[in-house]
Amino acid sequence: MLGAFLEKPNQIRVKHLDKPEPKVGEVSIKLSKVGICGSDVHLFKGHRILDKPTIIGHEGLGYIDKIGEGVEDKKVGDRVVIEPNIPCRNCRYCMAGHGNICINKRVIGLNEAGAFAEYLTIPADFAWQVPDTISDEDAVCIEPTAVAVHALFSSKAKPGDTIAVIGLGAIGLLLTHLALCLGYRVFVTEPNQTKVKMVTDFGAVPIIPTGNAEQQAVILSKIWEENGVMAVFECAGVAQTASLATAAAPRGSEIVLLGLSTDLATFTPLKIAREGIHIVPSIIYDHPTDFRRTLQLIHSKIIQPSFIISQYANLADLQDALTLAAEGNESKIIINI
Ligand SMILES: [Zn+2]
Ligand SMILES: [Zn+2]
């Protein structure tokens, strides 16, 4: 089979390798479509260094090719989407029901062979059968949509409430779409007008503050306060916007942190404490709840996540596709395997 290895930063090499065999409790999947994630781009650019050449990619859709021993609820030919973060179910975080922060987590496309390949193996319960009511295009967007589902449902804001989203990458777009479809009012802040347009079509209200960081915080704070914003979702993933969110969050609101910046952000303890602002972390999703919810939301036509797809490419062109993704103007590139 063919697999696309990240050999070193900025270098993908598509190589022949042996097809993996499913072990006990696993299935092997023949991949058909795989999305490029922001985290794949970070790996490609060398922001995080892998210790050996690795097949990256984790937003995978395909068909079951082979069933391992002991697997009873799956059959060859089933169309499945992979849930690529596999908690150990043994550590104290898993035991407390927080598999999303498991310390021994196996991650497809990071510490295990990923999805930019013709085949991969995965524990059977992390291969989710996709009903025929869901198109391939929506199905390949299920993994990032599960991130948005987890974040929105981590917040105390409910349908009918007003929220704000900073940053319209794939996750910000999906979160905004989900919230609008469920009846929230959503303010969005994002400099790229094409991305803003993708959600104003669904009813999002753009606020693009001008001036320096302090002036921007004053503008956002005033509009958010006046409109009763209950939760601010930081999806841009840079320290400046995390600082902006904490500076502008209205009294009594929540800041839900999804963006994964490694730089230091700032906040004023007096404001956070005195105004009763909660900072809520949101990382990936809980197994199995969030994938199940996501599949159901798409199946019942509440949401249609494929609107984020802006480009397709072939596995042989992954190097160029990752380079294009790194420029930041594409909302989602799908690789046809
Ligand atoms: Zn992803
Ligand atoms: Zn664990």
Image: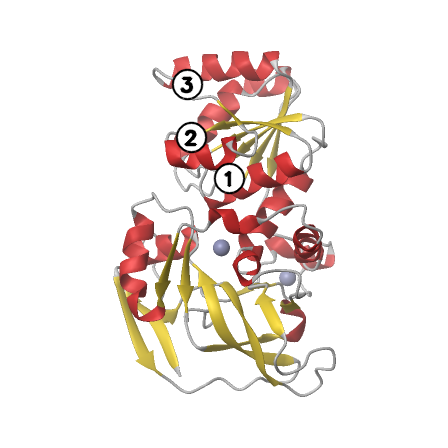
Please name the residue that numbered disc 1 is placed on: 172
Instruction: Tell me if 290 is positioned left or right of 117 in this view.
Output: right
Question: Do the numbered discs 1 and 3 sit on residues whose CB atoms are within 8 Å?
Answer: no
Tell me: is circle 2 under 8 Å from ligand 1. Answer: no
Q: Which residue is drawn at 31% across and 79% down?
A: 15
* Location of residue 321 by image quarter: bottom left
Q: Where is residue 17 in the image (x, y as percent from the top left)?
A: 37, 84
Question: Do the numbered discs 1 and 2 sit on residues whose CB atoms are within 8 Å?
Answer: yes
Q: How crowded is mark 1: few (under 14 residues within 10 Å), some or many (20 or more)?
A: many
Give the residue type that dot 2 points to: Glu
Give the residue type that dot 1 points to: Gly
Residue 190: assigned label: 2
Q: Where is residue 80 in the image (x, y as percent from the top left)?
A: 60, 70
Give the residue type that dot 3 points to: Pro
Which quarter of the figure is the C terminus placed in? bottom left
* Location of residue 12 by image quarter: bottom left
Q: Of residues 311 and 156, which is closer to you in this image?
A: 311
Q: Position of residue 180 (x, y in %)?
A: 62, 34
C-alpha distance separating marks 1 and 2: 9 Å
Mark nearer the N terminus (1 vs 3): 1
Mark nearer the N terminus (2 vs 3): 2
Q: Which residue is drawn at 42% across and 17% down?
A: 216
- Give the structural element (helix, strand or loop) at label 1: helix
Residue 267: assigned label: none
Q: Give the color scheme: rainbow, by chain, secondary structure or one colour.
A: secondary structure
C-alpha distance separating marks 2 and 3: 9 Å
Please name the residue that numbered disc 3 is placed on: 209
- Give the structural element (helix, strand or loop) at label 3: loop
Up-down: is 143 above or below 148? below
